Amino acid sequence: MAKGRHSLTAGSVALIAGLLVPLLVRNPYYIELGVQIEFYMVLAIGLNMVVGYCGLLDLGYAAFFAIGAYTTGILMTHLHFSFWFCIPFCILGAALAGVIIGGPTLRLRSDYLAVVTLGFGEIVQLLATNLKITGGATGIFGIHPLRLGAHAFSMTDYYYMMIILVVLGVVGAYSLRYSRVGRAWHYIREDEDAAMAMGVNTALFKLYAYITGAMWGSMVGAVYAVSMTAIAPESFSYSQSVLILIAVILGGLGSIPGVLVGAVLVVVLPELLRGVALFRLLVFGLLMVVFMILRPQGMWPENIRGVFKPLVGKTAGKKPGNGSALSLGGGGE
Amino acid sequence: MHFLWQILINGLFVGSFYALVALGYSMVYGIIRLINFAHGDLYMMGAFIGFTVLSLLFGKGGGTALGLVLAFVLAMIVVGVLGAGVERIAYKPLRKAPILSLLISALGMSLILENGVLATPGWGSQFLVYPFTSSPAGFSVFGASITYMQVLIFAASLVLMASLQIFVQKSIFGKAMRAIALDKDAAQLMGINISQIITLTFLLGSILAGAAGVMAGLYYKEIDFMMGFDIGLKAFTAAVLGGIGNIPGAVVGGFVLGVLEAVGSAYLGSQWENIFTFGVLILLLVFKPTGILGEKIGGRM
Amino acid sequence: MNILTVENLTLTFGGLMAISDLSFSVAKGQVTSLIGPNGAGKTCVFNCITGFYRPTGGRILFGGENLVGRPPYQITERGICRTFQNIRLFNALTAVENVAAGQHTRTGCGLLRCLFRTGRSRRDERNVREKSFRWLEFVGLTDFYDYQARQLPYGDQRRLEIARALASEPKLLLLDEPAAGMNHNEQERLLALIREIVQLGITVVMIDHNMGMVMQISNHIVVLDYGRKIAEGPPETVRNDEQVINAYLGEDFDAAS
């Protein structure tokens, strides 16, 4: 319990600090950096459900981000939809794509999924580059920013909006982790056959994980489109997918605080290494190999032991023996 | 009609690169069930090493047959050793780890190779023109024009594939490889040095990828540090198409994919070429994941 | 009363016959053992019953329903659960979260209920937790509830796997070599545990090589050799069966019992 309270405190402190940043920092560069970190945070939270919770290596996560961004961009510029009205379409589009890609391939060995998702990511980016409706290589621009009455959203407003999204993501991810669905995902990650033997419909639950990640990613894409007001295919490339994945892996597969830290790292490290920008992905590649060999659980691993606690302190003072177990009525239904 | 015929011929040439790279994927997958994401990048390394050797020898152009042979041999040796090194450093320590860790390590290795080349002075990010001027002389077969260079490349790739097949079928090492692919534990009990054979598998696959890289440089006349990414996906598609883990399958898959792609992009437009290929991959995995010559996947119990 | 009836079960792997025309029944509330030399097809029988392998022919009747063709999760739902020959726990998860896996089919919250923590999902969670701890206690592992499965000693891992299977509230429990690798003390504890399980009204089918244990605890024994049934009956009958002794020749059958 104590440990859980510690991370709650740490989380609240981080949140308050995050809320204060725009008041203390006036430099717009830092606000923009903050927004960028927030985008990687929410994307990492979504990808973590697929890779960290369920153990499915998705190398095309940016595709869902793209689906959300382009759906919003197209609906807002061509059909003059309001932003909020776009969101259901984004989610629907991502879910549909997720079912089409994931439905059949999730039955296969999980490493095949890595290649299929990689190919899917490429297809989406190529389509965005080559179709007319997506604006080709230049993309879509002139997406109207969000408004509250007469006030058009500034970068700082988006910063706060994204904090809400981060908090929603964290709460959602924790809710799932401590639930039947989240546990089923972990069982699949640990041993798919054993999970099946324990009654988990593995194909269905893998699809759940993949689609949950997809819908979340597309929603983030929608926010990305309005906040940037312009989108282009290169924001949804393979390296984008890999960067999100790096945040999840280096932070700690399956660990919420871990992936948040990972997202900070993914944005801040290249900024620190500005003089040697060429080495950015080289450094990340090295870190991936080194981490897998020396510390596969990542920088801030999940607190596995905190997941399941006895109801009241210990096991409610029940003495060992079959007396209490008999009341479970294992045989009779 | 002539048009189609020319396309088929071109498809076969490209297919031979795919086949050479697909062999590496297939062999590694067959023996340790790993999709080696760094494999496409080894092909790219081959192209760059060939580039450096040829530049040192000939400056910006020209070239002799002997120089070409030297470029091939050096690229094959360096890339072979590099591939085996990648296995020793990044994969061997993870042999007992979950497959996810191994895949991530492979992905990291791929980033290291790509960005290592990007950061190397003289290689860098721009397209490099291959410093070898081959004579445009050639001949025509039923109206399709073919250069002598293309014939040379094609013949070389066939020789490499045949040598590999003979090595795997006849040599004691090849037998050990096949034994490990069938049953690792039993192979170990029979006294086969598993580690050594796995490294050898990577060495062989990388040698072929290195050679394919030089060939690609000669054929396309232009190279860049991301060239391994596309071919990685395509060669993997070819390996799956032929039935992964199966050596003749990888070759057949490579040629079939090369031709399919050439025809597809001729009729749909070349900007759709990759969409076509990845579409083939996804449909293939959905409807016939065992490929043309492959056996059943699964049965892990 | 038979809880499970296997009729003419046949399983071939590309021409190789793993099980041929096997029939036997499992009486409710009893312990039935499948024995036979290595490679006799015992685990294959388990894999067929639990839906991991699809038999080439035959029927597997459970509660009047043919299970052949059903996926494993539906079979677990219907009340059959198993352990594995080479322990298959969720290694990185804690002991108690492993046991909670059993409750998966006994709870039904989907994605949305879990995401929004509805009343039902909270109730389910409390239930799952309570039951998981109780089953952990049943096998005597309460003190190790927050240990990762891989940190437990071998014998405890076996018992944890049994607790996980029991948590699925099975009517029929399949134990695949539960005593493998156990020392004498651990075996004694296991015997006691199996007796307690039977007392709960759960039917047990077990594969084991330890003849002493099999003879002691089984009500009924089915002997397989090369995928065929060569004998069947209560321990005394099987012990003296000539074919059985021949099949086991060289394995010192008498000494083992």
Image (cartoon, coloured by chain):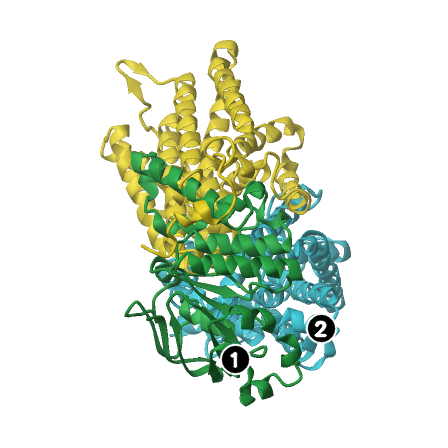
Chain colours: A yellow, B cyan, C green
Pointer 1 residue = C236
- Disc 2 or disc 1, which is closer to the eye? 1
| Secondary element type, mark 1 | helix
> Label 2 marks which chain's residue?
B
Q: CA distance from mark 2 to mark 1?
A: 39 Å
Task: Report the amino acid beneath label 2.
Answer: Leu
Q: Which one is nearer the viewer's eye here, A299 or B130?
A: A299
Residue at (28, 29) in percent of width and height: A83
Q: Can residue B133 be spotted in the picture?
A: no
| Secondary element type, mark 2 | helix
> Label 1 marks which chain's residue?
C
Query: What x and y, as percent, mark residue A155?
Result: 42, 19
Query: What x and y, as percent, mark residue A36?
Result: 49, 27
Question: In this picture, is B165 found above or below A302?
Answer: below
Q: From the viewer's perspective, tell me whether residue A131 is left or right of residue B61.
A: left
Residue at (37, 30) in percent of width and height: A223
